[in-house]
Image (spheres, rainbow, N blue to C red):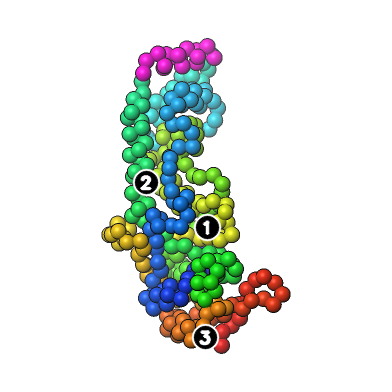
Amino acid sequence: MSATAKKQLFKYVDIAGATAILQNGTLLFSSPLYFNDPFDISIQTLFGYDAFDLEAHLDEFIALSTSDEVLPEGNGSAQSDIFVAVRSALSNASESYRANLRKEFFAKKIWDEESLRASGAETLAHIKTAFELSGIFCASKRFDNYLLWAHYAEKHQGAVLEFSPNVEKDSMLILAEDVEYTNNRPYLYESHKDFLIKSMFRKTEDILAEYTKKITKTKSLEWAYEEEIRLYMPILVNLFEGKKNHCLTYHDDELASVYLGCKMPKETKDSIVDLAINRNPEARIYEMIPDPHHYKLKPKPYA
């Protein structure tokens, strides 16, 4: 497992969630099928364009073949080898020659549109199945987000658990990544040109892995206030077995801090503190208090 930049992860949880995480030493990975945002990890189409506009495909192919654009090395496929040969042959071709070439291509049907559609549907089904068998752990960059306390921490009666990934132990938490927020949904292929370049110069498994990573960490701008961090774990087929969630173990010393909600009952606070200290005696314990002058929460060492 290769290490990336270390991030602090803050998990907002209700009382039951905090108790389970601290008692069991595990983190909950949820199936994307049950996320509360219908657009989250949802794939309606692989294409950001009309994938079956074959004339546009050919025009882009000819444009690429006759351009000076620097392209990646071929992926060893017959298609990339053919493209390199065609590009070399057309490097000095006249406009009339290119026009005639285009006309000849469309003189007879050389594409099987039904096969293309079936192939696209098969790829889509493959990606959807991969997501169904995967799990995601969601956290935030901040422990003091007022809205997240209300939404995910039982209306301030819950807690925020801070995890600090243990690099030396090659922790799974090292792989957590920031969510990117945008108004545009991600596609496997953004354009005809993108399709041609990827299909001729990239390995299919690399393309799918890149897309999977992209879609798991992309959300609508409406959710930007969450400042979310996600850890994606692929292919948990033997773990989910139709369940919504599955738990994976974290290292005890990764529990860095516990922030108790400002509305959490005193006896519950003491119970959560006992569980936290039992899990990691070095964990810092705070309680959140409302700022007397501003609409924000402040941490105070819990005594």
Q: Quadrant of the N terminus?
A: bottom left
Q: In this view, does 10 lie above or below 186?
A: below
Q: Where is residue 241 in the image (x, y as percent from the top left)?
A: 28, 59
Q: Say which residue label 1 marks.
A: 178
Say which amino acid is labelled 3. Answer: Lys
Q: Position of residue 139 (x, y in %)?
A: 49, 64
Q: Quadrant of the C terminus?
A: bottom right
Whether residue 225 appears in magenta in the rendering, the answer is no
Closer mark to the observer between disc 1 and disc 2: 2
Q: Say which residue label 2 marks.
A: 127
Q: Is mark 1 on a helix, strand or loop?
A: strand
Question: What span is in magenta?
Answer: 95-109
Q: Where is residue 18 in the image (x, y as percent from the top left)?
A: 45, 75
Closer mark to the observer between disc 3 and disc 1: 3
Q: Say which residue label 3 marks.
A: 266
Task: Name the N-terminal-most of marks 3 and 1.
Answer: 1
Q: Is residue 62 above or below residue 117?
A: above
